[in-house]
Image: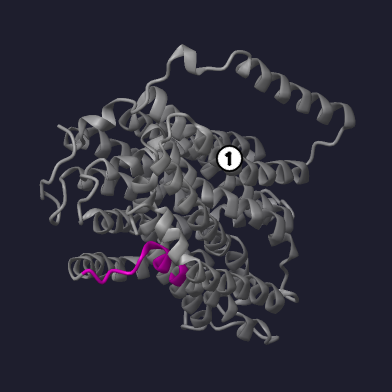
């Protein structure tokens, strides 16, 4: 069974239901963990936290996120060349569950670092593979493709909506480790859903799209990589320069350098045709726009999380709001508006009036910039911020997200060279890694006194880049060679 036009799930292939609910539970585990991770890291040891300085904790959360999504490039390669999308999703989910189990154990910083390893590798395997499986459900010109990715994106939102309310409340009000344990249980449910529903996925997901051959491995490549890593470790040990700051800087650099290297590999590969090479070139400005967007969006669980806990009137509605609850606002908005956008794209496509992909990206980036720029107003006040300001900011960035992120996944599956299908999806996911790598370098500048300048500079920069994308939209569309324009 290959691509199918079956309509078993809201007019879409039945396999979409399997991937929808698997992703919903995986995101429940991830966003539940992320809702309390910053607080757990900088909270006092006597209160159940690790006592890490707040500015260091912010950067560590950012590079943690960068590492998770950066691993998607390697995971995409393993899926394309060795495992296939289905097995990569399954193995990734198992590793993610192990990571959350580590956090559920009261074993201090050791468990935190071990959990990072499991979740980074697991998410790197699962995220590009499950997204590619969605694209494999549809023929290349199926008009339901953007709609299907939007519905799939709702699965992310369902899990992300419930997670901060459940895991966040349990972690903040009772015990952090209980919250992390609930996140592990969520991933376990997702694995059960995926195993039971695998039969609805196409045969493409069960085998690698570009199986590796021994001739494809350059001689000395593995030895060179190991030697380079060994030299770096030796240098760090001899100079006694290991520190959290060094880790942050190295991962930030890698998050930016690796996508650049990967674009270079695809553009120079003999397996990429001339038309595919043109499409990869058209993909670069979209990728850069996504990086800028994720700089803002991913700080919702870092800078805005701290702003919510320390600078917001959490009793404004007559009861104490857990600060982690603000992480659910964007997901609620997505659930409310995603169906409308899914229908809108199909209707506009049938009338030949659908906005181009660059136009959708531009609108999403401008709205995301405005979500930060608006916070300048309450940040200028010396008093506590009313929760509605934060709710408004999360709402705006979510509207931008629905115009950029699911569309980005969809156009990635269309613009990807055939020999790099899942790897290009990994590259798309790595746009978030690059955004968080940049965030890791700039979140250290945030504090309550500098908040107006911080929000203003980042927000207006995103607006300016969004406008620039509109200017170059005609060139980008020509390079797409008729795909996803």
What residue is disc 1 on? 106
The residue at the point 81 percent across, 24 percent down is 234
Q: Is residue 344 visible?
A: yes
Give the percent coordinates (x, y) of residue 9.
14, 52
Question: In front here: 286 or 103?
Answer: 286
Figure disc tally: 1
Q: Which residue reaches farthest right?
A: 239
Residue 163 is drawn in which quadrant?
Answer: bottom left
The residue at the point 37 percent across, 37 percent down is 129
Neighbour tally class for label 1: few under 14, some 14-19, many 20 plus, Cα within 10 Å? some
The residue at the point 13 percent across, 55 percent down is 11
> Measured along the vertical axis of the image, is residue 125 above or below residue 456?
above
- Is 220 colored magenta in this rendering? no
Instruction: Tell me if 417 is positioned left or right of 60 in this view.
Output: left
Q: Secondary structure at mark 1?
A: loop
The residue at the point 55 percent across, 83 percent down is 386
Question: In front here: 389 or 313?
Answer: 389
Image quadrant occupied by the N terminus: top left
Give the percent coordinates (x, y) of residue 476.
45, 59
Image quadrant occupied by the C terminus: bottom left
Instruction: Tell me if 146 is positioned left or right of 370 in this view.
Output: left
Residue 423 is drawn in which quadrant?
Answer: top left
Give the percent coordinates (x, y) of residue 408.
40, 55
Tell me which segment is drawn in magenta: 352-363
Instruction: Tell me if 79 is positioned left or right of 63 in this view.
Output: left
């Amino acid at each position: 069974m290959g691509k199918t036009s079956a309509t078993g799930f809201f007019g879409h292939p039945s396999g979409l239901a399997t991937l929808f609910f698997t992703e919903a539970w995986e995101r429940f585990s991830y966003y539940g963990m992320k809702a309390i991770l910053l607080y757990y890291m900088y909270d006092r040891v006597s209160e159940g936290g690790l006592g890490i300085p707040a500015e260091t904790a912010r950067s560590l959360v950012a590079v943690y996120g960068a590492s998770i999504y950066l691993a998607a490039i390697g995971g995409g390669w393993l899926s394309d060349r060795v495992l296939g999308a289905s097995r990569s999703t399954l193995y990734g989910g198992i590793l993610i569950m192990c990571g959350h189990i580590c956090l559920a154990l009261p074993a201090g910083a050791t468990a935190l670092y071990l959990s990072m390893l499991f979740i980074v590798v697991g998410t790197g395997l699962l995220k590009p593979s499950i997204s590619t499986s969605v694209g494999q459900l549809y023929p290349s010109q199926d008009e339901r493709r953007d709609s299907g990715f939007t519905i799939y994106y709702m699965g992310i939102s369902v899990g992300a909506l419930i997670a901060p309310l459940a895991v966040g409340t349990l972690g903040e009000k009772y015990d952090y480790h209980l919250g992390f344990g609930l996140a592990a249980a969520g991933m376990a449910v997702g694995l059960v859903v995926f195993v039971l529903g695998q039969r609805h996925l196409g045969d493409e997901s069960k085998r690698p799209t570009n199986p590796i051959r021994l001739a494809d491995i350059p001689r000395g490549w593995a030895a060179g990589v190991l030697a380079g890593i060994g030299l770096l470790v030796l240098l760090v040990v001899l100079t006694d320069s290991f520190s959290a700051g060094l880790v942050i800087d190295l991962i930030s650099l890698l998050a930016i350098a690796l996508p650049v290297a990967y674009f270079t590999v695809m553009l120079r590969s003999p397996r990429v045709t001339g038309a595919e090479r043109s499409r990869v070139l058209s993909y670069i400005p979209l990728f850069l726009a996504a990086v800028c967007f994720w700089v803002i969006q991913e700080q919702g669980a870092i800078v805005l999380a701290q702003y919510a806990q320390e600078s917001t009137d959490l009793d404004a509605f007559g009861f104490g709001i857990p600060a982690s609850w603000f992480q659910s606002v964007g997901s609620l908005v997505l659930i409310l508006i995603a169906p409308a956008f899914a229908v809108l794209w199909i209707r506009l496509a049938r009338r030949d009036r659908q906005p181009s992909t660059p136009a959708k990206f531009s609108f999403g980036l401008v709205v995301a910039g405005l979500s930060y720029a608006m916070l300048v107003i309450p940040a200028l006040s010396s008093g506590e911020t009313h929760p509605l300001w934060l709710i408004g900011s999360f709402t705006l960035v979510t509207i931008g997200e629905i115009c950029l992120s699911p569309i980005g996944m969809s156009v990635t599956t269309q613009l990807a060279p055939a020999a790099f299908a899942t790897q290009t999806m990994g590259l798309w996911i790595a746009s978030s890694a690059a955004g968080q790598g940049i965030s890791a370098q700039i979140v250290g500048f945030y504090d309550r006194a500098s908040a107006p300048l911080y929000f203003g500079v980042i927000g207006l920069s995103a607006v300016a880049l969004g406008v620039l994308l509109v200017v170059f939209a005609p060139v980008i569309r020509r390079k797409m060679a008729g795909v996803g324009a």
